[in-house]
Amino acid sequence: MLGFKSFLSRTRRIKKKSRNKRKLISQFAFGEQNCISHKNELPDREEVIEDTEEGFGLKSSAPSHTYGVQPLGNLYFNPGSINSRDTGLGNLHTLSDELVLEILGLLDATNLGVLATVSKSFYVFTNQEPIWRNLVLENLCDGFRYNGSWKSTYIGAYYPSFDISNITVQHLKVRDFYSDYLFQSWLCANLEMKPEWLVRDNIVRKKGISVEEFVKNFEEPNKPVLLEGCLDNWDALKNWDRDYLVQLCGDIKFSVGPVEMRLEDYFGYSDQVREERPLYLFDPKFAEKVPNLGSQYEVPAYFQEDLFGVLGEERPDYRWIIIGPAGSGSSFHVDPNSTSAWNAVIKGSKKWVLFPPDVIPPGVHPSPDGAEVASPVSIIEWFMNFYGETKSWKKKPIECICKAGEVVFVPNGWWHLVINLEESIAITQNYASRRNLLNVLDFLKRPNASILVSGTRDRVNLYEKFKNAVEDSFPGIIDELTQKEEKKIQQKKLSFWDSVTDSKVGAFKFSF
Ligand SMILES: O=C(O)CCC(=O)C(=O)O
């Protein structure tokens, strides 16, 4: 029996400073596990499936928990059972699992290995994959070949003569170890997206609209739209798949979280990995690294006005190739520097959930200065614990599944979450047109710009540089837009006044 209801909701904090897009997608914390598919170890699977009475379905390839960790609720169904998590930790048993993992994260591989022999509990804790993942990502920044698990990847890299098949195949199962924290991340790594998380599709879809219509109906009012058929002339759409890309640039290193990885090695990783937040390939320099990639797509007509272009080489990062397996994606965030974005799917499909700027998604807690955001540890955890809340909302979030050949327009300030439903390849670009130029300038000159501005080293001076360059290229544009904005505000005030007064009797319509 599984104690689903007793799960804690795990949260992580992300500092906005490091939230340029690349890092945003790649944060890694101890609150997660990964679970590798050991097909020869399936003793508990039946039990798991039977008990998903709340309708959670496990992926067909889901292995049992590698070390036999069970949710805490199970302890109460096993009378007389003692939680070896506590007995084996000695005096440390009063610490939370999260803290134990954080402390163990300070150790090196040798000490972890020694500690693993102390007790069953230390064996389970020291073998947690996030600890080894961090060791790999911190120490093998120039790339690595993923080798069945993070631990064996680390050991394979540092002790090549060691027979790592021992590590990947033989795990001791600890029968009486109960922990919601450790179990939850296994669960999140192995859950299928529930059909009810995918059905809502309320985004406006448009095909073949003119640029003027797009500006009037979507960009000006700052509303999302899914655009169909505007990538039809892209070579990328015809050519790009995993084999093509590996042949073209399999040896080239791309940004994957905090490391640079050969593309071929990244695909090797994404084939094997089963973790709650798979590493995501998110590279802003792809077109410089492989010019042929940059020449196989062009910016759709709707997004041609890109005022940051006036900064030339000094513009902040603005375009990314994005590649990731099913389950990878981007947790809730607002795009950098108050820009808008378009995101074109070339292969695969992505589930989107968007909330307007004035609605903070449930489970997400930005700090008042916007410099930090606390949110659930993973996307799947957000769906498990928070998505349901939106069912009863009058104003629902905007949602869709964006498929290959389609583009989502993300207006500035909108919170969005994206999860890949299958292996996906996409291009995204962030931009400022005259519709959001004033917002962008306001953002860049905030007092804490040095923390909030991203995608460039020169955060503090970006405001002056951008403003001057825009003025040089488009003299008078900022004044013109400011006056237009003031007029709009004035009109809004007037129409509000009209609506609350009755001109015939010259009195307020209000009555009490
Ligand atoms: O994962 C994705 O494709 C979405 C990326 C995203 O949200 C962004 O670029 O801001």
Image (cartoon, grey):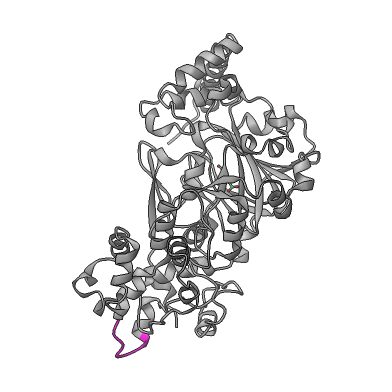
Work out whether 493 lies above or below 302. Answer: above
Work out whether 381 lies above or below 63. Answer: above
Which one is nearer the viewer's eye here, 493 or 214? Answer: 214
Which one is nearer the viewer's eye here, 507 or 173? Answer: 173
Question: Residue 221: horizontal and vertical position, in percent?
Answer: 61, 31
Name, please, the residue furthest toward the left: 91
Name, please, the residue furthest toward the bottom: 80
Decide if residue 454 is in sight here: yes
Q: Which residues are magenta?
A: 77-83
Number of numbered discs: 0
Q: Quadrant of residue 293?
A: top right
Question: Residue 176: horizontal and vertical position, in percent?
Answer: 35, 83
Q: Quadrant of residue 412?
A: top right
Task: Answer with left or right where residue 126 lies relative to residue 64.
Answer: left
Decide if residue 397 is in sight here: no
Residue 435 is covered by the magenta coloring: no
Task: Answer with left or right where residue 234 lies relative to residue 100.
Answer: right
Which one is nearer the viewer's eye here, 215 or 344? Answer: 344
